Amino acid sequence: MSDRARVTRRGLLVGGAAAATALGIGPLLGQETTSPVPAASAVVPDRWGRLARITEGGLLRPSSPQFAAEALPNNLRFEQVRPEAVVPCRTPQMIAEVLAWCQDYEMPFAIRGGGHSYTGFSTSRGVVLDMSPMNAIAYDAASGRVRVAAGALNAQVYEALRGAGRMITHGRCPTVGAAGFLLGGGIGFNMRRFGVGADRLVASEIVTADGRVRALSGDEETDLFWAIRGGGGGNFGVSTSFTLETQPVDARLTVARLVWRDKTLEAAKALFACTDAGPRVLGSRIALGGVTPALAAKGRQVPLTLLAQYAGSREEFLALLAPVLAVAVPDFTDVRELAYWEAQHFLMEPGEPGWYRERSAFLASAPSEEFLETTIEHLRQWPGTGAQASLFFFQTGGQVNETPPEATAFVHRDSRWLGVVGAVWNAEDAARPEAVRAAKAWQDALYGVVNRFGGAGAFQNFPDASLVDWRARYYGANLGRLERIKAAVDPTNLFSFPQSI
């Protein structure tokens, strides 16, 4: 389908009306009829049959053997939200036809890449547009650019770039969809060097509500190209591909995991000071874990964990950490020099389906001593519900901040850290509402502490259904422009979900 091609709802409705008249179902527009058509002669349209034809037999319904697995969301908090069908999409034209079908039958839908929406926005009680068949990845050595289809997962992107000897800003979870990652901005250990993932985009393709397949770049459909770089997934249409600039992989990369279970406060203060002043070739994630009051009474301290990537030697990395190591000796240390993509395996987070909830806020400076003291005390009051609970911080800054906030839809350009309060629970706790309530209440209180100490905004790729002011938190000063672009490309609000623009 060309950029000008379209599948219009009107065209399909007119065709349907003509067919209905031929069958004697009803009169042509403007004609009168002297007697009603008997109800027994009415023909009920086979909507699922029509959708099956659009998908060329790929449609999955509840009776399909693989439906249960395909319909399961990654966040099991929403496992009861099951669609009437999963629609594997293979081409932009097929997507346009499926969107027309959804409009014709007023069928709600969700778009799914990897399916990792924290608040269940990638599942629906209507249909799920499954992008996974569109997973082609092509690297062009002449330009140094890679074209990633919207159904590709991080793991597939990793393998393609490994073969090319290239890298981008990417995440750590192999089953996260590349489309959702990029559309919300995309954070990773490379962002301090290269910017967020969306900063590397040079072109994209999207199917909008009118059925058009639009090519986006800095020279074409510039408003929409601006919006998809941080405006969040599912707001403006169905993205089908992304073209990104790549970088040669590092010749030498050091990765590390260190854990302190003693002198946590002292170690945390030194660690934040050390990493915050570190070079942009350092990427880090610092986490503080929850401890129940019973364990705290027995002397168990809040654990502190550093996960890091450093584009340099092991010796250089350890020298950078020397002020921390002088304050407190880690209980666990694993520091390795590895080839770039082997190092990413070390840093990887599995991302298996589970019950979880996360609340985020950006911080303009590293946590102060008072901030750390207050949060550590709160972490000592974890009710023990759920598999784990933590307060963790992704290090931002560097190149992320050198792009002006109005240059792309990703507005969070003045932060040094992204703080996240996480809670995970298991199947046993999920069956006990009181346990989940306790976990959420504890989490909300800790999130209040983060905000009291300067937390602002929220990361749109970590959607949070509890936020009342989510528009301002996700998009800040860019919200007005995003709303105008939304009104222009989706005037009937076809792409709608609880936190859509």
Image (cartoon, rainbow, N blue to C red):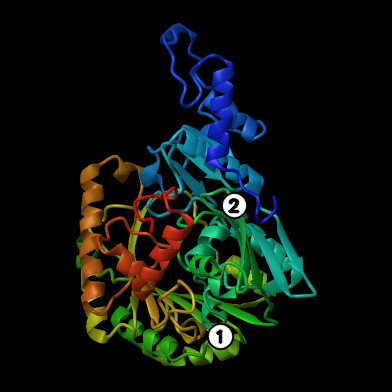
- Residue 358: x and y in percent read 35, 60
Give how far apart the Cα atoms at labels 2 and 1 are. 41 Å
**Residue 212, which numbered label?**
2
Q: Mark 1 points at which residue?
A: 281
Task: For label 2, count other residues whose C-alpha is less than 10 Å away and answer few (under 14), some (14-19) or many (20+).
Answer: many
Answer yes or no: is residue 163 visible.
no
- Is 330 placed left or right of 138 in the picture? left
Residue depicted at x 57% and y 80%: 194
Instruction: Give the amino acid at mark 2.
Output: Arg
Question: Mark 2 or mark 1: which is in front?
Answer: 2
Answer yes or no: is residue 343 visible.
yes
Residue depicted at x 39% and y 38%: 81
Near-viewer residue (481 or 428): 481
Instruction: Give the amino acid at mark 1.
Output: Val
Residue 331 picture quarter: bottom left
- Residue 250: x and y in percent read 67, 80
- Is 137 placed left or right of 22 in the picture? right
